Image (tube, coloured by chain):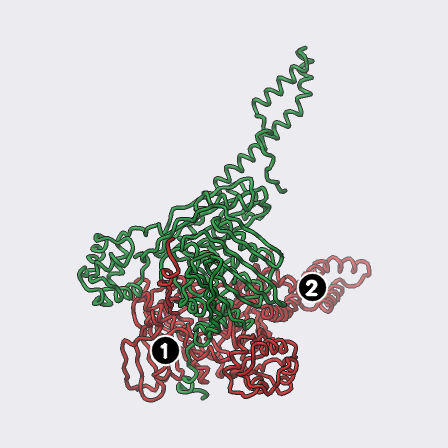
Chain colours: A green, B red
Amino acid sequence: MCANAEEMAQFQKEISISEFFEKNRHLLGYDNKIKALLTIVKEAVDNALDACEEARILPDIYLQIKQVDEEKYEIIIQDNGPGIVEKQIPKIFGKLLYGSKFHRHRQSRGQQGIGISGVVLYAQLTTGMPTVIESAIGDGNIHNYKLRIEVGRNEPKIVEKSTNPETEGWRGTRLRFVVEAVYREHKQSVLEYLRQTAIANPFANITFDSPNGRNEFKRGIDFLPKEPKAIQPHLEGVEIGILSRMAHQTVARTVENFFIEDFTRVGKVTAGDICSKAGVDPKTKPKSLTHEDFEKLIKAIKKVKLINPPMDCLSPLGTEAVISGLKKELDPIWVDAVVRSPSVYRGWPFQIEVGIAYGGSVKESKVMRLANRVPLLYMAGDCAITKSVNQIDWKNYKLSSKDLSEDPISIFVHMVSVWVPFTSESKEAVASYPEIIKEIKLALQECARKLGLFLSGQIKAREVHERKKTLEKYVDDIATALSNLSGEERAKIEKAMMEMIKWRWGDIDEQRDGKEPKEDG
Amino acid sequence: MCANAEEMAQFQKEISISEFFEKNRHLLGYDNKIKALLTIVKEAVDNALDACEEARILPDIYLQIKQVDEEKYEIIIQDNGPGIVEKQIPKIFGKLLYGSKFHRHRQSRGQQGIGISGVVLYAQLTTGMPTVIESAIGDGNIHNYKLRIEVGRNEPKIVEKSTNPETEGWRGTRLRFVVEAVYREHKQSVLEYLRQTAIANPFANITFDSPNGRNEFKRGIDFLPKEPKAIQPHLEGVEIGILSRMAHQTVARTVENFFIEDFTRVGKVTAGDICSKAGVDPKTKPKSLTHEDFEKLIKAIKKVKLINPPMDCLSPLGTEAVISGLKKELDPIWVDAVVRSPSVYRGWPFQIEVGIAYGGSVKESKVMRLANRVPLLYMAGDCAITKSVNQIDWKNYKLSSKDLSEDPISIFVHMVSVWVPFTSESKEAVASYPEIIKEIKLALQECARKLGLFLSGQIKAREVHERKKTLEKYVDDIATALSNLSGEERAKIEKAMMEMIKWRWGDIDEQRDGKEPKEDG
């Protein structure tokens, strides 16, 4: 025998989350050097936008990517947010699974507390360079940190620390990473991510100094979207493990109050109803509930009619912003948008909005996927959004191909939620909950119907146009024949006929803008 | 302004890895109740097989799945492994990111230290029930634990603990979970997982009492595969962050010895070569290396010819075992297997073996994906194995369709490695490293060529058969004509002709076994 229980025990050891992701970096989006650069920019820009929005500041984001060696880049990202208080800097940047968003149920770009510290980890892994963080919180100083992550302990290690006077009235956060990466401008690139970010965040100014020159994405509107509220958990989909943990942590003194205070949209009637269906005295102390009580409560919750969570925790862009974003960036001949009413999956509120841009500068089909205003560029095949688009037979909406392969169409699908269920830590695809797919499809269909009306108008116009052209061709012969038969003047007959055609078929050519989409085959 | 830096700081908080996976349970394979059941069985059976194999014991696994309520199942898994020492039980089962396999570079089914504690987490989340663990390590006792995970701290919480005398000579581990789940027998089910496990682990006996009755997977061979050795990291693909961390932790006193002792397959010559190319004195203390030294060393490593890692850390099944497994479970008319030589990705040794079974009881096309002897049933589209299969034009190998859609073929692809790069924590798909895809394709092509020879033999046989039939049709007429012309006896001519045909085209019908695959259209 080679190993007994004692021998095997010696290898048992704790694994730090930093070690875990260092070895499994592809789970965070660092599969290769091109994607790594996008992941870094995405994490940093998402954080910057979140910080500004949370502080109700119109974002001015500056991004610079500079090549410093073969496959080695320096990335600088600066925002005009509120800055970060000194004592929080090390943990926010130097500890994985640390952050402000995981425990709050509120719509934001970040949610896991892994993204930005993941960048610090990747930088030190690939170039050995510490990350530089500068923060100005309005106390007249800029606080500078150089830090690393102690991988084995998942704790920040401060390499250097200093404070300089702030002299230019700047407030915000500036980050500097040096990483192994490759810069490319293709369809899954930093540039494409910024372009889509500009569409979904028209209130942000983004300046990007790339290795190939400056790109500016100017602010389109001068106001922030309404601030999403944080909410308590909702009872729908709550599981026994969560319920019992919450009951042990609550400050409420009775089960009834526990339901009312710790969950959203539970009133005295609902709480009483749950307790009575479960046969649990509403005045019971939450901490003294037994396992059997929890089982009964969970069953009772499933039987009670629950009110949907409040929807002010969600902040979609709205039809106007979607339309103006698509117009601004894509210049189509037709554009429209649909915002669905909020809905719920597993107790989490979410909302879908869809925009479609057709023709004009749009030359081929493309699906833009976004979650909480963040463009998703990878893992399309895995995403509930792609699946929903593929489940629709687009021919029903007068498009020329079932799968859009031959149509000049850009589809913009945006999911907002207090908790987006991503298929991986790299947050590239939305998990396929049936409720989510259903909402996306309904939104797509509604918007597609509008497009269908436009396209069938175009098709009809084209048919009418053809008919008119055909008739016009014969006017000459018919007029001559009629003139011979009736002895009437030929020119008079011809004029009457042309007027009849115009009256009957309209002056089609004048109604059309000539921008009609090219028809293949 | 809504929030300043101070206000925002109050929400910053550490997130425990248990909380993280509780909320992101789909990352661990708990997307839905059907898949959840498979995930649980997979984690438990994988652990049981690993424990037995590591202790060089032929595994006897007992699995029972019993419905106890609507969508609620009790799952019992018992092995005959070495058992687990008492003090390790709580952490192994009650702490995520804890285990023996992450820090050892050795081929095993488990590698992350998340799987089995993830099951405990899922059980308590969905039913509130603690997990029961019984372990017999040969000291005459059975140690019983009931435990939960304290989610907020990611620490085990022992609910109950007892010791009973062991009276039946049993040694091993027995687990009992009660979970919310749904049992189904379809192509991604527990039964299919066990069937493929039986093929890839022919040395294991597995008894499964399902809700529908008993299934037995009998041991096919009476010996374990050779024991894979643990190895040191390899220099290929080592990054500066890892190198500098290892240098600070090493017990070696010189850089030269650090390379020799802490990495696999580095001798004095290679170590000296690296140091000289980097301009670093080989006698430098590893701890006193500067950032610049590390940068130079990393560059030097890339220039030095490295010897491949040793391959005794890998333990593929081998052609015989693959063939016998496929024969036993699938009963095809043709079967063969190919085992490639070991190869390396990012410094990790890996090896690919492929088996193909054709016709007979195989009625349609199917790809079985396995990694370190574990069948992968979900996320096929994301997997390097599926991609490799799809990149091959199977018509080149005499199959009737390019994508196998019309062929009766089962393809078995097995990757073994000291570190399989999975695309998610649920370990359902292999990440698409080019080196891995290349090896899989080469193995597939080599095996497909053999199948192609068989199939073209079959095709040729069929052609010959047709020709013979055609000739035979004319024998009668020709014999009569020749007899009239020559005056020779007709019967004699006919006999001579039949013999000629038999000599020329063979007695084809006797050579064929009549099992030839049906040809469509």
Instruction: Reply above or below: A450 against B85.
Output: above
Residue A291 or A358: which is nearer the viewer?
A358
Quadrant containing the C terminus of chain A is top right
- The mark nearer the N terminus, 1 or 2, is 1
Q: Quadrant of residue A262?
A: bottom left
Which chain is home to disc 1? B
Which chain is home to disc 2? B
Residue A455 or A154: which is nearer the viewer?
A154
Image position, residue A489 (x, y; %): 67, 12
Instruction: Reply above or below: B57 against A110.
Output: below
Q: Is residue A71 visible?
A: yes
**Residue occupied by mark 2:** B464
Q: CA distance from mark 1 to mark 2?
A: 68 Å
Answer few, some or many: residues within 10 Å of disc 2's Cα (few below 14, many 20 plus, some between 14 and 19). some
Image point (58%, 55%), residue name: A187
Quadrant containing the N terminus of chain A is bottom left
Q: Is residue B512 visible?
A: no
* Label 1–label 2 contact, CB within 8 A: no
Q: Amino acid at mark 2?
A: Val
Q: Quadrant of residue B215?
A: bottom left
Q: Are marks 1 and 2 on the same chain?
A: yes
Instruction: Reply above or below: A485 against A125.
Output: above
Image position, residue B415 (x, y; %): 54, 73
Label 2 residue SS: helix
Answer few, some or many: residues within 10 Å of disc 1's Cα (few below 14, many 20 plus, some between 14 and 19). many
Instruction: Reply above or below: A128 against B52.
Output: above
Query: Left or right: where does residue A31 sit relative to residue B207?
Result: right
Q: Amino acid at mark 1?
A: Lys
**Residue occupied by mark 1:** B91
